[in-house]
Image (tube, helix red, strand yellow):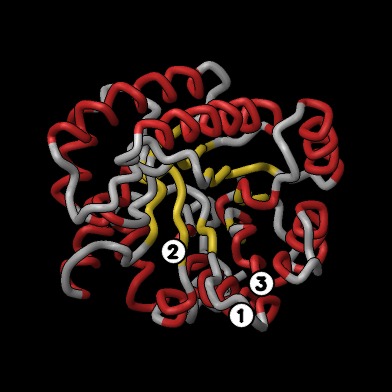
Amino acid sequence: MNEFNNYGIASYSFHGLKNIGAMDLFGYLETVKYRYNLNTADLWNGTLKCYDDDYLAIVKQNIDERGLTVVNLCCDNAHIWDNDPAVRQANEAVAWDCIKTARIIGAQSIRIDVGVREESVSEEQMDYIVPKYEEYCKAAAAFGARLGPENHWGGSQNYPSMERLFARVTAPNFALLLHLGNWQGTEEEKDRCDALFASRAMHIHLNYEHCAEADRILPPIKEAGYSGCWSVESHKSFNEYNNVAFQLAQVKRVISPLVYNGKWKVAPPSVVRGNTEA
């Protein structure tokens, strides 16, 4: 994908509209394509009606009609670990449904959470989680997708635990959905963790607060080796169209000059400030 168009909006950003019946999955696809002029879809499984093949074929048709690339599928209620074995079993069924969905709709990456609610991941939990990620990654690799957790909640926000997980999972398509700033620790420690995982990130989610500080936050992530889609996620649940527009504009404003790749003899002023030559 053209780096200058490599932006996205997580469909969870419109969960407030979804909750009042003002937006469904198809409305989201229309919105990102024609309101925000994007070429990507960043889907949350909470917007899917079901996992039936006939329904997913309709979803795929609507994605293709708009020329969209599905950069990520976020899968809730599919997390690997739960203290209740019955919940783990139910979640695994959802995970396989989501992997099937990703294959049908052509998702480039799949987020399945670790699921540990404690502040760090124990060895017992790690021993259960690692083989599941290996299994899921093997299935995702069959259709060219990357798969992994998000530093989302609980133990996945613990940097040492995530480093242990990434040291143990051997699948080459295992990667992180990097939720900027969502680590345990001080703000400085969170920034450092973001940079350390940037090159291993398959996708990124930028909340409102980090978009507001885009000038400080984003250049180090690009410099640290992140090369995926820059996708914004609003958690506000109100005024969502405008909040998302602000977030997206902030990201584009800061990132666009950073992706100049030298193909022009002189970068135009729209890309690099101060250049006046054609």
Report the Cα–Cα distance between label 2 and label 3. 33 Å
Considering only order in the chain, which callout, 2 or 1, is on the residue closer to the N terminus?
A: 1
Element at label 1: helix
Q: Name the residue: 61% across, 80% down.
A: 243
The quarter holding residue 214 reads bottom left
Kind of residue at disc 3: Gly
The quarter holding residue 181 reads bottom left
Q: Depth check: 26 or 200 in front?
A: 26
Q: Quadrant of the C terminus?
A: bottom right
For residue 277, say whether it is visible: no
Residue 26 x, y percent position in the rendering:
81, 52
Foreground label between 1 and 2: 1
Q: Residues within 10 Å of mark 1 (few under 14, many from 20)?
A: some
Residue tagged 3: 16
Kind of residue at disc 2: Leu
Compared with 32, 48 (above or below) is above
Compared with 252, 196 (above or below) is above
Foreground label between 3 and 1: 3
Considering only order in the chain, which callout, 3 or 2, is on the residue closer to the N terminus?
A: 3
Q: Name the residue: 55% across, 56% down.
A: 264
Report the Cα–Cα distance between label 1 and label 2. 24 Å
Residue 47 x, y percent position in the rendering:
69, 52
Residue tagged 1: 243
Considering only order in the chain, which callout, 1 or 3, is on the residue closer to the N terminus?
A: 3
Residue tagged 2: 258
